[in-house]
Image (spheres, rainbow, N blue to C red):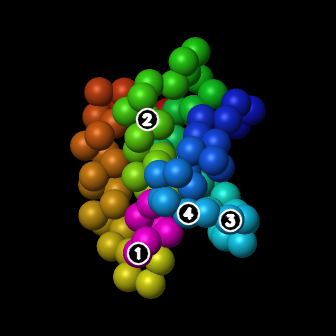
Amino acid sequence: MSAVVVTLEEAKTWLRVDGETEDALIGSFMAAAEDIVAGILRQPLSDFAEVPEVVRQAILYATAQFYEQREALLTPVLVDTIKRLLFAYRKESW
């Protein structure tokens, strides 16, 4: 994906994280969140001329879940929530 959908600064604000000590960890969670969102949408995020706000919110939500629940993340709940958020933008197939 070429364009940045959510910046590290936006994610850190969402997570209420100050400082730089966890930047790499948060960045890896963001990348995983973008991959999950693209998979649920069944299209690369770069296909959007302008990324809808609900897609950005889904990425932030997933990033927050990875960060806050890293020891006890319930992946089915995460995926179900994101599917519900993105239903209107989801393609029928790849």
Nearest the viewer among 29 and 9 is: 9
Element at label 4:
loop
Residue on which the image places disc 4: 17
Real-space CA distance between mark 4 and mark 1, rounded to the nearest whole angstrom: 15 Å
10, above or below 91, in the image: below
Which of discs 3 and 2 lies nearer the camera? The answer is: 3
Numbered circle sitting on residue 55: 2
Real-space CA distance between mark 1 and mark 3, rounded to the nearest whole angstrom: 20 Å
Which of discs 4 and 2 lies nearer the camera? The answer is: 4
The structure residue drawn at horizontal position 29% and vertical position 40%, both measured from the top left corner, is 85
Element at label 3:
loop
Q: Earlier in the sequence, mark 3 or mark 2?
A: 3
The structure residue drawn at horizontal position 52% and vertical position 51%, both measured from the top left corner, is 13
Q: In which quarter of the image is residue 12?
A: bottom right
Amino acid carrying label 2: it is Val
Residue on which the image places disc 1: 69
Q: Where is residue 19 in the image (x, y as percent from the top left)?
A: 68, 65
Label 1–label 2 contact, CB within 8 A: no
Real-space CA distance between mark 3 and mark 2, rounded to the nearest whole angstrom: 26 Å
Predominant secondary structure in magenta?
helix
Amino acid carrying label 1: it is Gln
Q: Give the range drawn in magenta.
A: 64-69
Where's the N terminus, which quadrant? top right
